[in-house]
Image (spheres, rainbow, N blue to C red):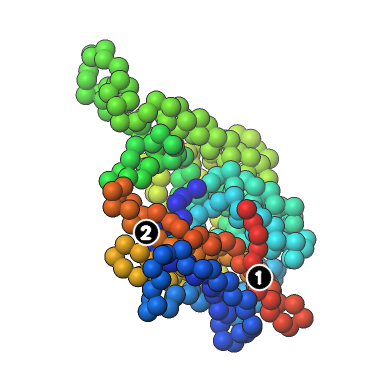
Amino acid sequence: MKNRSRRLVPRSISHEPKLDSAHSVATKKFSYMPQSQDPIDDKPKIKQPPVLFAKTQMVIEKAAKLLGGPLITYWNNPRGSVCSNDVIALYEVLERLGFHETIYLFLKSDGGSGQVSLRMVNLLRQHCKNLVALVPLECASAATLITLGANQILMGPTAYLTAVDTSLNHALSPLDRDNDRVSVNLDEVNRVIRRWRSEQGSSVENPYKSLFGYVHPLVIGAVDRAESLSVMLCRELLAYHIGDEDRANEIAATLNSKYPSHSYPILLNEAKKIGLNVAALAPEVNALLLELHRLYSEMGQKATTDFSEVKAHGNEILNILESTNFQVFFQHDKDWFYRSEERRWITMNDNSGWRQIERISGKLRQSIMHNA
């Protein structure tokens, strides 16, 4: 899973985000005593991200009518990711939606955990006979894996998938200049080895001896194992709708080893060449999904309150799942302090968690969704 965020974020007071004015309701506030020994009386008001439930519901209703079936949205902030808690959030959405012949899934994500992708598709397939993935924008890495479990993928003019080869952030991974662990990709390691051998000619020196000075051998072993997992995940997901094992193996191999970059954009025509069941997204549906993206981007904007150069509070909505009458999202809500001796930001007073909004009998209810 990708890091949620490392940016500035504030102090010791946590508030629930306010609903948009069209459907405002009384919202329970949660306050916490400051931890500082010298309270700041004139500190700025904590910024809150907007929650645009009324507006997003209107767009979802229009899109569902055009599609002829229920629409589920799964949107990740660039600092969010496909992660394990999303499975429970998706379950909450699907339990309210029930079983349908066809479910349409709007996907916008930069990726995350491939194993979570398998769990999410498994859950979706229990609630429908046919799954259609709607991709108007980026649908990368683990999000591409989710589309592999769909019977059909509909892509807009700005949409793309990516390769699904595995990058691993290990406890023994190398450190970057900000003292954070970096991800290691098996293809990159193999390219280094091949380059070494091609330039060394007849030398019998083991290239791994030098490489181990930069990348721990256990990390290389873990990445190699993860690469095998990625191929297996592709096969499992494709098996939901492709009975030809050879065809599924070919698609899996292509997505794991053909492309020179993990982020290489696989556009509609290229996706067809791979063997995926892909078609163009209807312009009017694409327009509505882009409008949803704009609304979610407004919700997902950084709401950082700076107290000083080394202290701040951050509120930011990272992952959003939504369907008719129900929305659930993960929000960062915590203080950030810069520890200069370690050259990194640390968090305190972390009240991050899942929030949900539901319309019941015309009334809106907003609450905390406990999802450890």
In the displayed image of the protein, which residue is found farthest to the front? 37
Q: Position of residue 254 (x, y in %)?
A: 48, 39
On the image, numbered disc 2 is attached to which residue? 337
Determine which of the numbered discs, if any, sits on residue 353 in the image.
Answer: none
Is residue 11 found left or right of 238 in the rendered image? left
* Amino acid type indicated by mark 2: Phe
Q: Nearer the viewer, residue 65 or 212?
A: 212
Q: CA distance from mark 2 to mark 1?
A: 28 Å
* Amino acid type indicated by mark 1: Ser
Q: Secondary structure at mark 2?
A: strand
Is residue 40 found left or right of 295 in the rendered image? left
Q: Nearer the viewer, residue 144 or 272?
A: 144
What is the quadrant of residue 258 in the picture? top left
Q: Position of residue 204 (x, y in %)?
A: 26, 12
Q: Position of residue 186 (x, y in %)?
A: 41, 33
- Residue 16 seen in the figure: yes
Q: Which of disc 1 and disc 2 is earlier in sequence?
A: 2
Residue drawn at the location 68% of the way across and 79% of the way down: 364
Residue drawn at the location 37% of the way across and 79% of the way down: 42
Is residue 122 found left or right of 262 in the rendered image? right
Is residue 70 found left or right of 32 in the rendered image? right
In the displayed image of the protein, which residue is found farthest to the bottom? 22
Q: Position of residue 339 (x, y in %)?
A: 33, 53
Q: Residues within 10 Å of mark 2 (few under 14, many from 20)?
A: many
On the image, numbered disc 1 is attached to which residue? 367
Residue drawn at the location 50% of the way across and 30% of the way down: 225
